[in-house]
Image (tube, grey):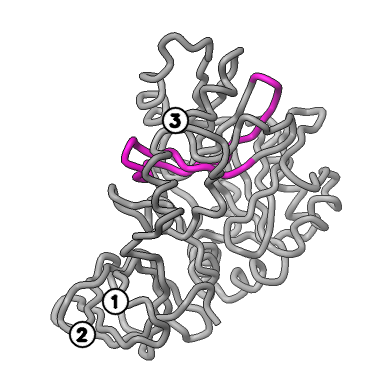
Amino acid sequence: MNPSPLADTHAANGAQMEGTDGWLLPARYGADIAPEIEALKHGAALIDMAEVATVTLAGPDARRFCNGMFTNNMRDLKTGQSNRSAACDDRGRVLALLDMLCIDDDAFLAVLEGVTAEWFEERYGLYIVFDDVEMTTFEQAPWVLSLQGPQAESILRQAGLPTPEEGHLQTEDGTRVCRKDRAGTGGFDLLLSTEALQTTFNALVDAGASLVGRDALNAVRIFNGRAAWPQDGTEKSLVHELRIDKEVCNFSKGCYLGQEVINRIDVKGGVTKRLMGLLFDEDAPLPLGSEVHLEDKVVGTVSSIAKIDDQVMALSVLRKKAWDAQTQVEVHTGDRTIPARVTELPLP
């Protein structure tokens, strides 16, 4: 496991560390994560995202290349604007998610979700043949700190950092501040040099940010019904099944990899699976991957699970017959059968 550059700081604050995508990062900062959940829902939560990799794509053909590879509109992005996009194969199946930041007329910065820079370079380097595009990958710096919650903007200002109304902006020392909602409560990502990482972290804590680990971030994300990649997907997932199509797709920009399948689904429907919530009446250990059954047939598997205020809730991509809210299902785990009911997202 790679240690975060902030490992000593996390240890000094009592963090319980766990592996996240090959990195050792805070899972929580105490036995009770209720204060961390409270910070995400009502305050400002500071989260170390050291595992997040970035890639730049620059050159005269970068805009056309990005527009043809990914699902959102790169053609019309102006410097300082950004959007979320999906990287799909030619059958429209999701391979990765990424935030695309336009940093110049002919340069884009991709902030990756669920994949490494090495994976990105290996896959998309194959498509750069006759295009005048230079790809630069970063497994480490810029480091990503995320400040999430309704008070994030206020805390950034108190720490002397600017807040873009939309998209992103860069400070004089090279720090990039980006609008980014990771849990459904609003927030920002900060892309930082190694030199600026510790001082910025300290400044945000001094301004009132609360230290929050992945357990709380994951819980609030789940209760707000937001799919994470690759936790809630498979090698066959489609953007409509994960309910991210409105966020990551532009349906009028022209051709891109996977566009034919994605547009056909959007126009004609035909999705037979969709991300839904599951509510449990009992607090029982429930491993990820547990099968969801309806009328003795498997209709999905548990992909994310969390507990807030004694309510256990999971996400699962369910088959159409289980979409109706309040449908009673059974989750099979080992030799146990646990009852649950289906709910729409986000949770009521």
**Which one is nearer the viewer's eye here, 171 or 5?**
171
Residue reaching furthest to the front: 268
Q: Is residue 115 left or right of residue 273?
A: right
The quadrant holding residue 144 is: top right
Marks 3 and 2, how far apart at CA? 41 Å
First of labels 2, 1 by sequence position = 1
What is the three-letter code of the residue carrying label 2? Thr
Say what secondary structure mark 2 lies in: strand
Residue for badge 1: 321
Residue 337 numbered tag? 2
Q: Are marks 3 and 1 in contact (CB under 8 Å)?
A: no
The answer to which quarter of the image holds residue 276 is bottom left
Could one spot residue 19 in this view of the protein?
A: no
**Distance from the alpha carbon under mark 2 to that under mark 1:** 20 Å
Residue 130 lies, with reference to residue 84, above or below; the image says above
Q: Please provide the residue range marked out in magenta.
A: 83-106
